[in-house]
Amino acid sequence: RPGVGAALLRADAEAVDNVRIARVDAVALLDKHLPPIPQFDECCFFFPDPWFKDKDAGRRILRPSTLDLLAARLRPGGKLRVATDVDAYAAHVRGVVAADPRWTACEAPWRPETMYERRGVERGQ
């Protein structure tokens, strides 16, 4: 089951107490609600909206200004994990990360499986 409720139930079932959930725009959360102090070991952006049209590219969540917000809030050695199934968005992310010397791109050892991938595997595709 997706959503905040499912996340809270899973955290409770696994007795995880270091999880915070906010149902708010992620950039607004970073910019307006969380102080710019190191507080995260990891930030994950799994399958963000790729905003395909050129006129909407500025709405993509992973852009230089977001990296600035994240850099101030990740602890030393912290990780930014990004997963997308859109090649153009992956190229965009690689370009944004490569342009900022504070960040290093590497292959992720793990990423979540999408519902569509799971269905394909179940169907033998």
Image: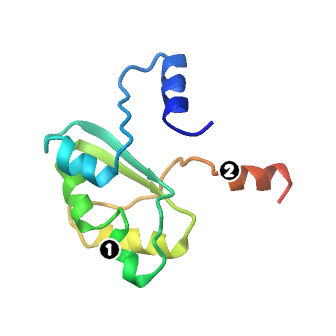
Crowding around mark 2 (Cα neighbors within 10 Å: few <14, some 14 to 19, many 20+) is few
**Which residue lies at the image location 31% right of the left edge and 60% below the top edge?**
104
Question: Residue 104 or 92: which is nearer the viewer?
Answer: 92
Q: Closer to the observer: label 1 or label 2?
A: 1
Residue 8 at x, y = what percent? Answer: 48, 26
Q: CA distance from mark 1 to mark 2?
A: 27 Å
Please identify the quadrant where the N terminus is shown. Answer: top right
Residue marked by disc 2: 115
Q: Secondary structure at mark 1?
A: helix
Reply above or below: 5 against 63: above
Question: Residue 98 or 47: which is nearer the viewer?
Answer: 47
Question: Residue 22 or 86: which is nearer the viewer?
Answer: 22
Crowding around mark 1 (Cα neighbors within 10 Å: few <14, some 14 to 19, many 20+) is few
Q: Which mark is residue 58?
A: 1
Q: Which mark is residue 75?
A: none
Tell me if 94 is positioned left or right of 30 in this view.
right
